[in-house]
Image (cartoon, rainbow, N blue to C red):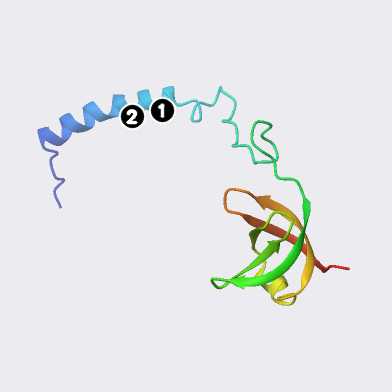
Amino acid sequence: MKAKRVTPVVSVFLASALPLATAALAQDPARRQDSPPPRQSQTQDQCPNKQQSEVKTFAGKITKSNGRYVLEDPSTNNPYYLDDAKSAKKYEGKNVVVTGTLDAANRTIHVQKIESAA
């Protein structure tokens, strides 16, 4: 079997691409072995400039709205979506205290626990 000859066009392409690829690798600090590894992105807990969510308690009545469980807070007259439907289902129609973190942008409480209100 005879070896195929590389056409001049392919040779020119390969010859011009190789220096570009090695230059890109040399400039990328993540690929250089003598530089420290790139920093990992920080989580919300590690970023001091981002608004950190703290665990809070919310009181109100659990109802269902548009197929989702919500906590109707009478003090603010605002509903908050609950991200734990399994826990919320047990308390539907009852007054509760929900412990969790608030995602204000989506008006969602990330539930840690739900307890009956006294």
Q: Quadrant of residue 72?
A: bottom right
- In the rendered structure, which amino acid carries the disc numbered 1? Leu
Q: Residue furthest left?
A: 8
Of residue 67 and residue 43, the one placed in the foreground of this image is 67
Image quadrant containing the C terminus: bottom right
Residue at which label 2 appears: 21
- In the rendered structure, which amino acid carries the disc numbered 2? Ala
Report the side of 27 relative to 107 (left or right).
left
Report the side of 56 relative to 103 (left or right).
right
Disc 1 packing (10 Å; few <14; some 14–19; many ≥20): few
Q: Name the disc covering residue 25, or none.
A: 1
Estimate the x, y position of residue 98 in percent, counting from the top left.
77, 61
Q: Secondary structure at mark 1?
A: helix
Of residue 95 and residue 24, the one placed in the foreground of this image is 95
Of residue 66 and residue 24, the one placed in the foreground of this image is 66
Q: Secondary structure at mark 2?
A: helix
Q: Quadrant of residue 52?
A: top right
Estimate the x, y position of residue 73 in percent, counting from the top left.
71, 60
Q: Quadrant of residue 93?
A: bottom right
**Residue found 22% across the figure and 32% down from its top:** 14
Q: Is residue 34 above or below residue 58?
A: above
Estimate the x, y position of residue 18 in percent, counting from the top left.
29, 28
